[in-house]
Amino acid sequence: MAAFWSMGPGTFEVPMSLFAKNRQRLSEKLQSGQIVLLQGGEDISHYDTDIQYVFRQEAYFTWLCGVKEPGCYFALDVKTKKAHLFVPHLPDEYEVWMGKLLTCDQFKKIYAVDEVHYVEELASVLKSLNPEALLTLTGPNTDSGLTAKEAVFEGIDEFTVDNETLFPIIAELRVIKTPEEIEVMRYVCKVSSDAHKQVMLYAKPGLKEYQCESVFLDHCYRIGGCRHVSYTCICGSGQNAATLHYGHAAAPNSKIIEDGDLCLFDMGGNYAGYAADITCTFPGNGKFTNDQKLVYEAVLAARDAVVREAKPGVLWTDMHLTANRSMLQHLKDGGLLLGDVEEMIENGVNAILQPHGLGHLIGLDVHDVGGYLPHCPPRPEGPLARLRTARRLQAGMLLTIEPGCYFIDKLLDRAKANPTQARFFDWSRVEKYRGCGGVRIEDDVLITENGVENFTFVPRTVAEIEEHMANGANFK
């Protein structure tokens, strides 16, 4: 019987062959005599207490073997293609408090690997394999600025260690998803889409933002088996919708939704380590005003333009500008902006209204790796420097498409004081939007051989949103 992992009946069964295929893909890029060695994540305590954070496995480790437990190592022998898992040798007392101890043979069956050893055997087992070099992983994450943790163990100084070869290879392999990975992503995006739809039915004026967040969390976990979300939920209503990373500790989704507020809710479930990232913007009372409709449909037009034009070979920077042009033209047609759209872009008006990039790679990290690897186009200068990648699209990439339009006081004030930018705004109209927040529409999409397959299934047009919400709390 084929090995798989799931959260039980009704949830997606992730085959262990997914990770075996990843190992095969990696070994084809390497040389006989090399052994890949990765160290998994560790349990982390809450400061100096005996309470631990809910464990989440390191993403490269997940990609290679799918192992869920902390404190493990994993070795891939390129010559033999054998997979060696090393697990902690826990004391018998563990069973009293934490549950039955698994044997090495049980781990072997669960994860469908060739050999399982205890971590204390790591050095001796590796010596017996007689590697020409241990390939360890270290390299920069271009989104966080942090560095991937390199495997270390007692006795590693007795081996020839190469910490340069592996990182660019494995990061690039993570950019292009296998059919098996795509199915996991399809599942977590469907669960997250359904959770957003439940939130839209529940939301109404008088509720706190976090009450809506709790509906999303409940659906993802109770229905979809997503114990984690992929990032801190952003549930901004009214002016909070203009705070791009709202929801942090100092702004914990605690505002009361008021009649007339737009709600910008950016939330994504996480299943088997794979991330969804979806944003819905909708009126808290179920009905768009004409002013809200203008901005919403400008952002939707930007999303639609990218969905039409994205395909293999197209530069992501060009897609960003395609979205900007579409949105600016719609706002100009609606009377908020004045002048020539290309001149607006030349003068940075697009970055006043949408300071972030069009989207990002997504997979085992919500901002997935591979955006600016050495062989890729470098980070652009100017307003496009915010983009998380400047790559050409390839079939098998999964990305978010997330255009937005925000009325951020600091940026509007800066534009108003800058004559080269101020001339493009009808300030008599724009000033009325201060305090209203903003709009973002974010879909998770797969680049196919011919274009785009959208994995996000939520109401998107004004009519679809209002019709969906007509069945919800506002109208019962």
Image (cartoon, helix red, strand yellow):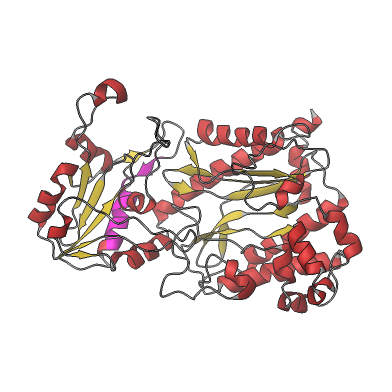
Position of 442 relative to 307 (above/below): above
User: Is residue 176 at all visible to an observer of this figure?
Assistant: no
Q: Is residue 405 above or below residue 251?
A: below
In the image, residue 16 lies in the stretch drawn in magenta: yes
**Vertical relation: 19 (above or below) 31:** above
- Horizontal and vertical percent for residue 475? 80, 31
Whether residue 83 sits left or right of residue 359 in the image: it is left
Image quadrant where residue 408 sits: bottom right
Q: Identify the image quadrant of residue 272.
A: top left
Q: How many marks?
A: 0
Rendering coords of residue 124 (x, y %): 10, 50
Q: Dividing the picture into quarters, in which one does residue 320 lie?
A: bottom right
| Residue 318 location (% of width, % of height) | 61, 74
Q: Is 308 covered by the magenta stretch?
A: no
Measured as percent of width and height from the top left, residue 300 is found at: 72, 58
User: Which residue is at 41% across, 55% downward?
Assistant: 179
Q: Residue 119 versus residue 171: which sits nearer the camera?
A: 119
What is the quadrant of the N terminus in the image?
top left
What range of the chain is rendered magenta?
13-26
Looking at the image, which residue is at 22% across and 41% down?
87
Is 452 positioned to the left or the right of 40 in the image?
right
Residue 299 visible at all: yes
Q: Residue at x 68, y 62 (%)?
A: 304
Judge left or right: residue 81 versus residue 426.
left
